[in-house]
Amino acid sequence: MQVTRSQISLFLCLLSCASSLGTRYTPDWASLDARPLPEWYDEVKFGIFVHWGVFSVPAFGSEWFWWYWKGAQSPSYIQFMTKNYPPGFSYTDFAPEFHAQFFDPDEWADIFEASGAKYVVLTNKHHEGFTNWGSPYSWNWNSVDNGPHRDLVGDLGAAIRKRSLHYGLYNSLYEWFNPIYLSDKQSGFKTQDYVVKKAMPELHELVNRYKPDLIWSDGDWEAPDTYWNSTGFLAWLYNDSPVKDVVVTNDRWGLGCYCKHGGYYNCADKFTPGELPNHKWEKCQSVDTISWGYRRNMKLSELMDLPSIIKDMVYVVALGGNYLLNVGPTSDGMIAPLFEERLRGIGAWLKVNGEAIYATKPWRVQAENATVPVWYTSKSSTVYAIFTSNPMQNSFKLLTPKTSYNTVVTLLGNPEPLKWAPLQTTGLIVLLPDLPFTPADAWTLKLDEVA
């Protein structure tokens, strides 16, 4: 029997449909956790976190300002308000002062690109509930109706994507003082009015409108994932959303989900594992060690310096993680010069050493301490030995790599092969050149054809 071209096309179409149907995910953790993580996320390694909202107006203490003032009733926050604002001033009165008048999304995107970051995550909505876009579910408590009177999420997203960076959005599930949420909480989360009327419709709208490559969920910990309907949302996200093939998610989808369910794991803010995790993970860290949001009262001693940031990033990547570094812009839309200086310093280091970071894998040994502490990353038969302190000597010993006749050793930034000699069983000793000055205080040896 002769098979026609149309029959072949129909057969291929049926095969494609069957394949597509075979990869659909059901709203349960066993199915959702089996979804492969889109490859782009592991390859990019370094991203920028941006905490921006109404909390950037008082710019005191932290982005949890409203909670510490009215929830915890912290004396220092009450005193700050008493000294600086008239009686009866409410948190919502800060919103009209969130002007963002100097916000230039292209300027921000240029800074982020210069940092060497490959993805950017912006707070769409923090725990205060104010959305940085015109959410139809947050009437008059959003950046289009109030404050800046512009779509901050959309404007930054357009600038980020023009530079071929990935764009992600942070989203707090809960809202501290939302009366509908508080009613559900009062019921012991036996009712889900807030989820049905606010949280989930808004999240669906956010995904459909802005098509984020990453959703950084937070504010989940007071209630189980069954209250949030997290598995239902993720099944839709992975099966039917406009970003189903590329979107990446974290693990903050309800009480008990941390380090257990979702896409990659955050586990906790500033998560610092002592050994190689068996699941893709991310460390979120802030240049300002006290706060994620901008603080007018921050001190230089409270900021991470460039060597500390690079050392932290290298450790994270060597242990298979991604590094998401936060800056908090001012309420008028500026990235503080000190933050910009840190970001550009990272980018300068990555221009020389980036091949030891981007698209690498953890090596069979992640660290050693012979001459100075060394962190390892790898690509196929190439191993990178990154050291974050100057050995102050020309001989440099590495105990772990197994060399061969074809082994070549270079210092990134200098194409000339270095002289080396094998140690007795494994390892080698390298003759270092004078190390070039770098404000990051970190250098990389590239070892080709080692095991």
Image: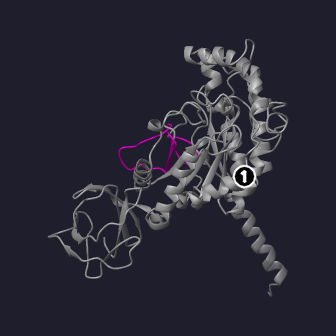
The structure's colour scheme is one colour
For the residue pair 7 and 105, the one nearer the viewer reads as 105
Instruction: Point out the stretch of residues depicted in magenta.
Output: 260-287
Residue 2 position in % (x across, y down): 80, 88
Residue 263 vertical position relative to residue 253 in the rendered view, above or below? below
Residue 310 position in % (x across, y down): 43, 53
Residue 162 vertical position relative to residue 194 in the rendered view, above or below? below
Residue 183 vertical position relative to residue 99 in the rendered view, above or below? above
Q: Can residue 84 be seen at all in this image of the molecule?
A: yes
Q: Is residue 282 magenta?
A: yes
Magenta stretch secondary structure, dominant = loop
The quarter holding residue 66 reads top right
Three-letter residue code for mark 1: Pro
Q: Residues within 10 Å of mark 1 (few under 14, many from 20)?
A: some
**Number of marks in the rendered image:** 1
Name the residue at 46% across, 36% down.
302
Using residue 111 as the reference point, say whether residue 383 is left or right of it: left
Helix, strand or loop status at disc 1: helix
Residue 10 position in % (x across, y down): 81, 74
Q: Can residue 213 be seen at all in this image of the molecule?
A: no
For the residue pair 171 and 433, the one nearer the viewer reads as 433
Query: On the image, numbered disc 1 is attached to which residue?
Result: 105
Residue 305 position in % (x across, y down): 44, 46
Name the residue at 47% across, 38% down.
300
For the residue pair 181 and 392, the one nearer the viewer reads as 392
Q: Is residue 373 magenta?
A: no
Q: Where is the C terminus found, in terms of image quarters?
A: bottom left
The quarter holding residue 257 reads top right
The quarter holding residue 246 reads bottom right
Using residue 178 as the reference point, say whether residue 299 is left or right of it: left
